Image (tube, rainbow, N blue to C red):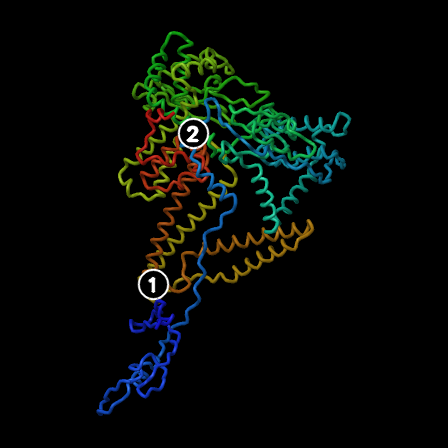
Amino acid sequence: AKRPAARARKKRMSYNEDSDDEDFAEDPKPPAKKRKTKNGNGRSSNGSSSKAATPKTKKDKNGKKKSSTSATKKKRTPVKKSKTPIKKPPAKKKGLKQMERAERISHAMQAYLWWNAEDPPKGCQWVQMEHAGVSFPEPYEPHGVNMLYDGEEVVLTPLEEEAATFFAATDPEGMHLGNPKTAPIFIKNFMADFRLALGKKHMIKDFKKCDFEPIRKHLEEQKLVRKAITDAERKVNKDVKNTAMFKYGYSLVDGHLEKVGNYNMEPPGAFRGRGEHPKMGKLKQRVAPEQVMINVSECAPVPICNVPGHAWGELRHDPTVQWLCQWTENINNQNKYMQLAAQSSFKGKSDRSKYNKAAKLCGNIDKIRADYKKNLTNKSQEKRQLATAMWVIDRLALRVGGEKDTDEEADTVGCCSLRVEHLKFDPNAEGDDNKEIELEFLGKDSMLFKQTIDFGSTLYTENNGMGEQVYKNFERFCNKKKSTEDVFDDLTPSDLNAHLKSIMDGLTAKVFRTYNASKTLQDELLKTEKRVGWKRLTAAEKVVEYNNANREVAILCNHQRSVSKAQVAALDGLGTKLETLKLQKKLLKKILKKITSQGDDAKIPLKKDPTKMVAKATKAADKAKTMKEKAKTKEEKIAATEATEKSKVMKKAVAEAKFTEMHLWATKPNKTQVIKRIEMWTEKIKKMEMNIKHKDDNKEVSLGTSKLNYMDPRISVAWCKKNEVPIEKVFSKTLRDKFNWSMAVPPDWEFNEEIAKQG
């Protein structure tokens, strides 16, 4: 006979965590099918066999026989269930994180390793390129708020109103209108263009009679209205933005996807510029599609222009250039380009080539330095000036510089354009053999370069540095000259650049800067690794040392930034928190002293219950959220924004109250707890002091510029691997994406002339 189906299945075991091995039991089986068999009397009975039908007997204690069936029944007596807690249903397993479409595309794009791919034909950047063109901003929508002129309202046309709104949107206390040096320039340029828009016969002529306050007030109200946006509206806005990004933000280049950098056309507005730009305040005009040139491959479809009634100005098929779109802006009449993003293969190839070229200097730098040092004492004035300029570019990392039309662009200065007024000999009037010169001028992007160089110091004289000779040359070049005359009057930028290229193919002042930045970083990092106790430092402490090395590079290259009000406020806030932590540590020590001397009788201050305060802040936030969702009119939205800001203030007050009592306990602590908390607070104070020092040291220095453009990223990657520091602590995601080609270098990688052989 066939075995029952139930027996063919594997036995399933159930396990009770609180039971012993005896509590393992088989899951109840379904009853077996009954079969008819004949017993000894010839009658049919239900059972598996005749033997099975005859019960076995056993003797009990009194010798009487008893059926085994009774024993079996007793054995089957249910065991008392142990009192175990009822198990909750198992929690649902968390699935994989659902990535958004942009994330999925980003991950897919990382699969393309351009450094392993075949290069396009010589002289070409690509073979096939397809993209959707540039996205234009929406046309201006008039708000209908009139400005005042001589106290009276003036009705403006949409074009005139847009121009007035550009000025009203400029912060009157900001870096342009709030600066007494730049404000007159800004106002003069704006009024010149504003009057062109108004026409010669318009009543508005004098800026002093203009009042833009009604428009400015309207713009402030609009800001409050926008802040009252609901989550649903925010999602809609995000979807609209993503739709544009998926359409215009990617390009198909030689069969793989590349991200486009700036696919949004620059909107019109008031030109700001950098520093004291002579054209600040002029009106940037709206760019029309007819001004745009499109560059795609011949086999690619021409992008559709998204502005109704307009068409592209020109169509090109030029694989020798990298740009996708080109147009000319009206302020400086310069060409602007839409190009691929910083993490693209185009930029990656350019970056790697730049750093490899700088590495080539490692093998040529001694020869180059020997050449210009020899000419520092040359009798020829031209050769002596050329040698001195080479020394300045090499040791001080100055740019070449060139003549500029100060009516068209800011008066920024480089090596060749230094004037006598930019040098101040012996600035501290120390006399004797003082060899100090204070250099002060506006460098690139109108950033102030102000350094006192001691040409007699060991830094510039050791290993035949010739610092003192350079000082003498500067004295000679400035002698009997007016303050406005050039220091290097016998040297032009073209002469200097030609000389650099004659020394080494492709050598420029920027290659010198890149070399010096990379070499300085590598040398500074090696110095820190040789210090005693380096291996005992934590990853966070090693990152501080890395930032110190980065700061040396930023100072060398004059990478500065202006300190914002937000930075000052943040530093002040951290300082206040540090003082609070120190005070709390003192109080903890007093508490420990009390517990040690008085034991259980010691009166210890306890933490106040913040429940009411938290509930009040939460209620205010919920109320503000409800107001946002219900707001329909402008007034309701402004009220909702004000309620939100108020709830944020309350939330901040709760956080401050909690921080103030963070060192206390809800119940009376024991001695061990207090000791542990004192140790914890010591560590907190140490960490915050390190954080404040780092932020304060770097507040005026731009560390990011050096990382982005001048320091070979492979130095940082190798250092992180060698010292077991996560790369995320040194490079942001943007930098990791940009320098993805550098991530595979080994820990012992070095910046040297061998790297240059890679091309």
User: Image height check: is 461 above or below 18?
Assistant: above
Which quadrant is the N terminus positioned in?
bottom left
- Which label is found at residue 194? none
Q: As rendered, which of 609 and 417 lies closer to the eye?
A: 417
- Residue 172 lies in what quarter of the image? top right
Q: As rendered, which of 215 and 29 lies closer to the eye?
A: 29
Name the kind of residue labelled 1 in the image. Answer: Asn
Q: Residue at x 45, y 46 (%)?
A: 574
Q: Residue at x 32, y 23 (%)?
A: 458
- Which residue, as the protein is rendered here, is positioned at the far top? 379
User: Image height check: is 655 above or below 30?
Assistant: above
Q: Which residue is mark 2?
A: 118
Q: Which residue is mark 1?
A: 670
Q: Secondary structure at mark 1?
A: loop
In percent of width and height, residue 488 lies at 46, 14
User: Image height check: is 398 above or below 219?
Assistant: above
User: Image height check: is 405 above or below 303?
Assistant: above
Q: Residues within 10 Å of mark 2 (few under 14, many from 20)?
A: few
Number of dots carrying numbers: 2
Numbered disc in front, either 2 or 1: 2
In percent of width and height, residue 160 lies at 72, 32
In percent of width and height, residue 268 lies at 64, 32
- Residue 245 lies in what quarter of the image? top right
- N-term mark: 2 or 1: 2
Whole-angstrom CA distance, mark 2 to mark 1, is 70 Å
Q: As rendered, which of 599 and 349 lies closer to the eye?
A: 349
Which quadrant is the C terminus positioned in?
top left
Name the kind of residue labelled 2 in the image. Answer: Glu
